[in-house]
Amino acid sequence: MQGDSSAGGNGGGLNPYRGRGVYVIVLLVLINIVNFVDRQLPFILIGSIKADLQLSDTQIGLMAGLSFAIVYSVAGLPLARLADRGSPRKVLALALGVWSIATALTGFAQNFLQMVLSRVTVAAAEAGSTPTGHALISRSFMADKRAIALALFSCGVPIGSTLGLGLGGYINDMFNWRVAFFIVGLPGLLLALLAWFTLPEARRAGNEGAAPEAYGPGLRYLFALPSFRNMAAACSLYAIGSYAMNVFGSAFLMRVHGLTATQAGLGFGLAFGVGGAIGTFMGGYLGDRLGQRDPRWRQWIPAIGQFLSIPTALGAWLCADPLLSIILLTFTYMFGLLYFACSFATGQMLVPERMRATASAVLLFCLTLVGSSIGPIVVGRVSDLLEPTHGDLSLRYAMSLMAITIAWSGWHYHRAAIALPGDFARIAKEAPNA
């Protein structure tokens, strides 16, 4: 495709290892870190919020899962469309400013409804982060460095999650959950100003490829590709388990193993941060290296990761030792998140430049709408149903159900791998000048 033979709109493109490219990728990573600090923060504060506002696990699942997922999924598509058709820099900076203010204001919530309203505002703004970040990277970086730039950007997910859990738990123990939202929310405003004034405009190049400009036909173009359909299904199914782990992982360590908020935040944060960073980076690196030999590796790597994460996840929930549980969770995230950079980098390869933010937003729509909405609410509901007979151990057994969707995800990644060569051949045929 033409967009992969040039960096697009910036005179040859940047290199993430040199000069201005280093600054751009560092700033984008910092923004992604803030994104996931703000997103993960409520999860370590669940115990305090639940006690203060008298919430059930089902309400926690609705607040942190279903309501967030619906708004995030729906808002992501129009924001991605704005980024594709205009300035991803401006969309990203404005979104960052809004979600940072909304995070700080969450500390004023006095009831369940106010918590939901504050979190859906965060969701609506954060929906613009990943698609616009991907669009900026695709327009700004040289084609042969784009996959590693996407992998570096994606490392903000586990790093931000670690900081959100660790800082949130510490601030909660030192002060309270409301102060945690104030302190964590406001620094994003500085990054929003830096993004607005210092990120490159990265205007898109001319027409490329055969994908349609209109939104509806563009979506049909994406889902006409068997590899994209299976990849979207795989992301969604993995997200059911992973979002449930994100929401209830720290609460699990506190309830089942008796850890404090600080201990649980640090332990779970390190598991997510260390395991997730390794898995995210290695997924992008291996996908780029092995994918040059055989494109199917770009989806076989996530498939292998999903199947490897099943025994470690079950071990983490069912073992009796908290340290072993944290170690197994580290491997669970490391194996599971091999999918992240591989999936989004592959999505960028399947579409022309003018659809790259949209392709990322569609994947996020699928994995967030399905994963965030189904995973936490199902686990929360099952935990509530089992609590009368199993007490605090109810969360352990509810979490174990997620192994089913992880295995199903691995199967779809395998199907995506089989379809990739044919889809690449079809794209090359439709864009003979690529």
Image: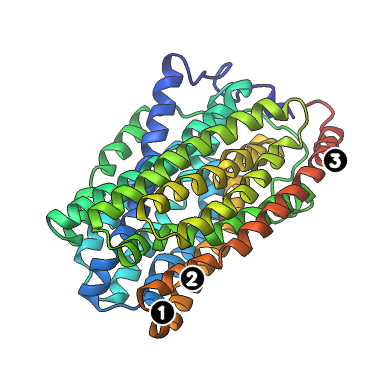
Compared to 323, does 398 lie above or below? below
Residue 4 vs residue 146, the one in the foreground: 146
Q: Residues within 10 Å of mark 3 (few under 14, many from 20)?
A: some
Measure the C-alpha gap from mark 1 to mark 2: 9 Å
Compared to 150, does 63 lie above or below? below
Left or right of 414: which side holds 278?
left
Q: Which residue is mark 2?
A: 397
Q: Nearer the viewer, mark 3 or mark 2?
A: 2
| Label disc, if present, on residue 348 of the rendered structure | none
**Looking at the picture, which amino acid does disc 1 mark?**
His
Q: Residue at x 41, y 77 (%)?
A: 58
Marks 3 and 1, the one that precedes in the sequence: 1
Residue 320 vs residue 46, the one in the foreground: 320
Marks 1 and 2, the one that precedes in the sequence: 1
Q: Residue at x 71, y 30 (%)?
A: 291
Is residue 148 visible from the viewing direction of this image?
yes
Left or right of 320: which side holds 133?
right
Give yes or no for contact between labels 1 and 2 (Cβ–Cβ under 8 Å).
yes
Q: Which residue is mark 1?
A: 390
Marks 3 and 2, the one that precedes in the sequence: 2
Left or right of 249: which side holds 408?
right
**Looking at the picture, which amino acid does disc 2 mark?**
Tyr
| Label disc, if present, on residue 422 of the rendered structure | 3
